[in-house]
Image (spheres, coloured by chain):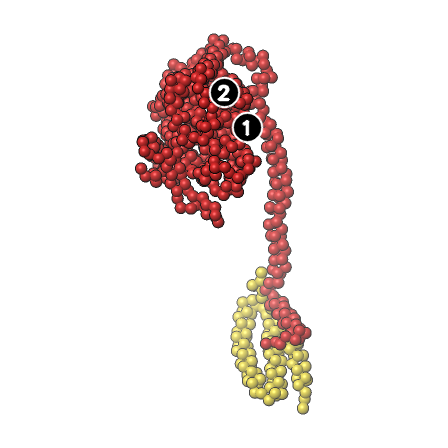
Amino acid sequence: MVPIAYYLILAAILFTVGVAAFLIKRNVITIFMSIELMLNAVNLTFVAFSHMWHQVSGQIFVFFVMVVAAAEAAVGLAIIIALFRARQTLSIDQVDLMKN
Amino acid sequence: MNPNLLWYIPLLPFVGFLLNGTLGRKLPRAAVTAIALLFTAAPAAIVANIWIYMKSAGAPLTLSVISKPWIAVSGFQVNFAFTVDHLTMIMLAIITGVGFLIHLYSAGYMAHEDGFWRFFAYLNLFMFFMLVLVLSANFLLLFVGWEGVGLASYLLIGFYFTKDSAANAGKKAFVVNRIGDFGFLIAMFLIIAHFGTLNFDSVFRQLSSHTEVSTCVLTTIGFMLLLGATGKSAQIPLYVWLPDAMEGPTPVSALIHAATMVTAGIYMIARCHVLFALTPAVMTTIAIIGAATALMAATIGMVQHDIKRVLAYSTVSQLGYMVLALGVGAYSAGIFHLMTHAFFKALLFLSAGSVIHAMGGEQDMRKMGGLWKKIPITFWTMTFGVLAIAGLPPFAGFFSKDEILYSAFAAGTTVGKVTWFIGLITAGLTSFYMFRLWFKTFFGAPRFEEATEAHHGHHDSHAGHGIHVHESPLVMTIPLMVLALLSLIGGWVGVPEALHGHAEFSHFLAPVFSSAAEAAPEVANHSVELGLAAISVLTALLGFFVAYVMYYRKPGTGAALAAKMKPVYNLIDHKYWVDEIYGTVLVAPLQMFSRFVLGGVVESGVVQGVPAAGAGITRGLSSITRRMQSGNIRSYAGWLAFGAAVILLIAIFTQVPVR
C-alpha cells in the first residue's frame, strides 16, 4: 500500500506548481489552467484521505469541486473571449482597469 | 396689581428688538420707527403704573416675581427673579422715560441713515438688557444685563462699522468692560463660596445679621465689585472707553451716557450698599476714585474741541461725582445726581446732536460760533442743560450736586473734606468748560464758512448739507424741550430742608437705604449747608465768568493762555497720556505676545502644525496602501497566497486547529 504521505507530497507539489504558474504566467489561458491544477491537487488530497479513512464524503466533495470547476471553465472561457474581443490581447497585465 | 406685569417691562423692548432685527430690513422706515417707539413706550407706561401703585397707601414697598429654578445645582439655586423697590423704581423711570425720548429723537436724527432698522433694533436691545439689569433680584441676572449692555454698547458704538475708528472704539469699550466684568465675576464666585446664594435679599440679610464671613473676604468682594463698577461707570482706571464711545451716533451717546450703561456701576454699588457699609477701606477707595475721576475728567474737558468729547468728559466727571457720593455713604444723593444727570446729559447730547445736525456733520467747536439765532430751539434747550450741569439754581443739577458736596463735607472724615474740596474745584471747572462750549458754539462770529469744505468722513448726521444751517425737525426738538423742562424742574423733588424743601427724594429712597441712613450724620445746623451751597454757587459763577471773559469778551485769551502754559496744556490736551501709557504698558506687550508667541509659535506651530502633521501621516500611509491596489490580478493573487501561507504557518506553529 502506498503511504498517504506520497499522495500529500504530490498534491503539495501540484498545488505549488499551480500557484507559481498563476503568479508568474501572463497568459490568461495558462492562468486558467493553473487554477485547474490547484483544484486537482486539492481533489487528490480529498481522494487520498477518503481512501485512508474509508469515508465516502471526501470523494463526494471531489464531485462538487469538479462541478464547480466545470461551471467556472464555461464562465471563465466566456470571459476570456470577451476580454480578447475588447482588448485584442490575452496578457493579464494589460487588464488593470480597476486600479487605484 | 399683578406683579407678573414686571415680566413685560424688559420683554417688550426685546420683542421690539426681535421684530426690527429680523423683519426690519424689509419694513418701511415708518413701521420700524413705530415698532421701536411702541415697544419702549409700553414699558414706560407699565413703569408709570407700578409707580402710582407703589406710591399709593397700603401698597407694599417691594414687588417681586420669581420664575421656576433657572440654575439648580445641589443646594445652590438661582431663579429668574425680578424685584422692584424704590431704587429700582427710579432707575426704571429714568431708563424707560429718558430712553423713550432718545428713541423719539433718533427717529428724526437717524432718518437719512443706512441701517435704520439695525439701529433701532440695537437701541431696543440696549433697553432690554438695562431693564433686566435693574430689575434683577440676584447677582447673576444682574450680570446678564451687565454683559448685555456691554454687548449692545459694542454694537451701537461700532454702528458705523465701515469706519475704522468706530469699529475700534466699539472694541475698546468691549475689552475695557471685560476687565471690569472679570472683577464682577470674581466677586460673584466669592459670594457663592461664602454665602451660598446669589440672591440680593439673602446675601444682605446674612450681612446685616452678624455674619461669620471675615472682613478680609468682604473687602475683597467689595474691591472686585468696585472694579466692575469702574469698568461700567467709566471711573479711573477704566474710564478710557467712554470718550471714544463718541464714535457712535449721537443718540447712542445720549443713551449710554444718560440712561443706561454708565449708570449700571452706580446702581450696582448703591444696590450693594449693605456690603460696602461693612468695608470702610473700600468705601474710602470709592470716594477717592470718584473724586479723582471727577477732577481729572473735568480738566481734560476744558481743552477738548470736539463738542461731543467735551460732553463725554463731563459725563466721566459727573459719574465721578456720583461715585464720590456713594463713597461717602450718601447713596440717595448719588442716585439723585444720577437722575438729574440723566435729564441734563441726555438733553446736552441730543442738543449737541441737533447742533451737529444743523452744521451738516461738523463736530469741531472751532468751526462753529454764532449759532444762537439760527437754531433758537436748540440754543435755548441746550442753555437749560448747560445751566443744569454747571450747578446753578434753580436747575436740577444744582440740587443734586450740592447734596453730594454737602454730604461729603458733613461725612466728618478727612477723606470727606478732601473729596468735598476736590468736588468744589471740579464744580468750578465744570461750569467753566460747559460755558466755554456754550460760548464757542452759539456766540461770537460764525466760523463755519470755511468749515463746509473740510468735513469729509463724518458719517454721523448729514454730510453734504453744506453751509445751510437749519433747525432740527419737530420730532427732534420735542424731546429736547421735554428734557429741558426736566433739567429745570427735575431737581425740585430733592430740595433740601435747608432751602425749605422736604428732601422728598431721599425720603422716597429711605426704605432702600434705611440701614445706611443711620450711619449718615444728621447735622441739624442748616447754616453750614446754606454756606456750602453759597460757596458752590459762587464757584459755578466764577467758572461762568472766566469762560465769559476768555471766550466772549476777549476770544484770544484761551489760545494765549495755552501758549503760555505749554507743558501743562500739552499734558491735559493729551489726556495725561493715559491712552498712550495703556498702549505701551499693556496693549503693546500683549500684541507682541499674541503676534509672536501665540501667532508665531502656537498658531503656526501647534494649531496649524498638528493637523498638518496628521494629514501628512495619513497621506504617507495612504501612499503605501494605495500602491497595493494596482489592479494587477497577479499581485493580488500573490498577496492572497502570501496571506494564506502566513495563516497556515501561524496555525501550524501555534497549534490552533484550523476550522
Identify the subunit bearing mark 1. Answer: B
Q: Nearer the viewer, residue B277 or A39?
A: B277
Q: CA distance from mark 1 to mark 2?
A: 17 Å
Colour yellow belongs to chain: A
Write the residue at 41% across / 36% down: B135
As drawn, the label of residue B285 is 1
Residues behind callouts 1 and 2 on a single chain: yes
**Image quarter (top left, top right, bottom left or bottom right) of the N terminus of chain B:** top left
x then y, percent, for residue A89: 58, 68
Q: Is residue B244 above or below residue B78?
A: above
Colour red belongs to chain: B
Left or right: where B549 falls relative to B394: right
Write the residue at 33% across / 30% down: B55
Identify the subunit bearing mark 2. Answer: B
As drawn, the label of residue B373 is none
Left or right: where B552 falls relative to B105: right
Q: Is residue B398 above or below residue B186?
A: above
Q: How many marks?
A: 2
**Image quarter (top left, top right, bottom left or bottom right) of the C terminus of chain B:** bottom right
Q: Give the residue pinned by disc 2.
A: B409
Write the residue at 45% across / 28% down: B518
- Amino acid carrying label 2: it is Phe
